[in-house]
Amino acid sequence: MKKLRVTVEGKSYDVTVELLGEGSVTPAPLPAPTLPVSSSPSSGSGDAVPSPLAGKVVSIDVKAGQQVSEGDELMILEAMKMNTHVFSPASGTIGSILVQAGDNVEEGQSLATIA
């Protein structure tokens, strides 16, 4: 396993990758990506939680007003028959949920706000 920093369109992401052919072929779970917090306006107050990819909202695991810690799972998105877990980028209180299960979302779209 190697830790790498990838920069996409000026945004840095810390990732862990497995080098195939070196050691075990059993995949290890990846840590939650560190996602930048969007400063784009949203309908709720607080920092927006952006969608890491375009896809469909499968489930929402939090409610408005709920306390969350950094790294807590907020929701699950599906894209190309694969589930992507969206984690809280910071500790705080969920200000608002801006999507519903079944909604299609675009990459970077605000999913929720954390105050």
Image (tube, grey):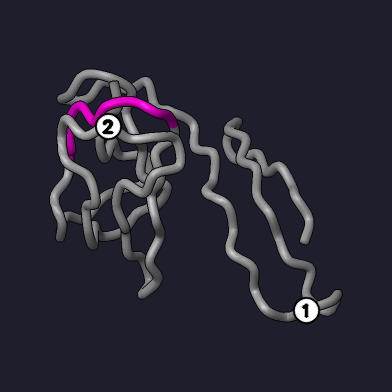
Q: Position of residue 15 (x, y in %)?
A: 65, 49
Up-down: is 77 above or below 90? below
- Residue found at the very far right of the displayed protein: 22
Up-down: is 9 above or below 73? above
Q: Quadrant of the N terminus?
A: bottom right
In the rendered structure, the answer to whether residue 86 lies left or right of residue 96 reads: right
Callout 1, which amino acid?
Ser
Q: Position of residue 75 (x, y in %)?
A: 29, 52
Up-down: is 45 above or below 29? above
Occupied quadrant, residue 87 = top left
Up-down: is 77 above or below 115? below
Task: State the residue at coordinates (23%, 57%).
Answer: 57
Q: Which mark is residue 78?
A: none
In the rendered structure, the answer to whether residue 110 lies left or right of residue 18 reads: left
Q: Position of residue 44 (x, y in %)?
A: 17, 24
Question: Which is more N-terminal, label 1 or label 2?
Answer: 1
Q: Which residue is mark 1?
A: 24
Magenta span of residues: 90-98
Circle 2 Cα neighbour tier, 10 Å, few/some/many (<14 / 14–19 / ≥20): some
Occupied quadrant, residue 6 = top right
In the rendered structure, the answer to whether residue 35 lies left or right of residue 1 reads: left
Confirm whether the magenta stretch covers residue 89: no
Circle 1 Cα neighbour tier, 10 Å, few/some/many (<14 / 14–19 / ≥20): few
- What is the distance, in whole Å, between disc 2 and disc 1 at their CAs? 38 Å
Q: Nearer the viewer, mark 2 or mark 1?
A: 2
| Number of numbered discs | 2
Q: Quadrant of the C terminus?
A: top left
Task: State the residue at coordinates (59%, 58%).
Answer: 30
Q: Position of residue 31 (x, y in %)?
A: 58, 52
From the viewer's side, name the closer residue of 37 and 67. Answer: 67
Label 1 sits on a secondary structure element that is loop
Q: Which residue is mark 2?
A: 67
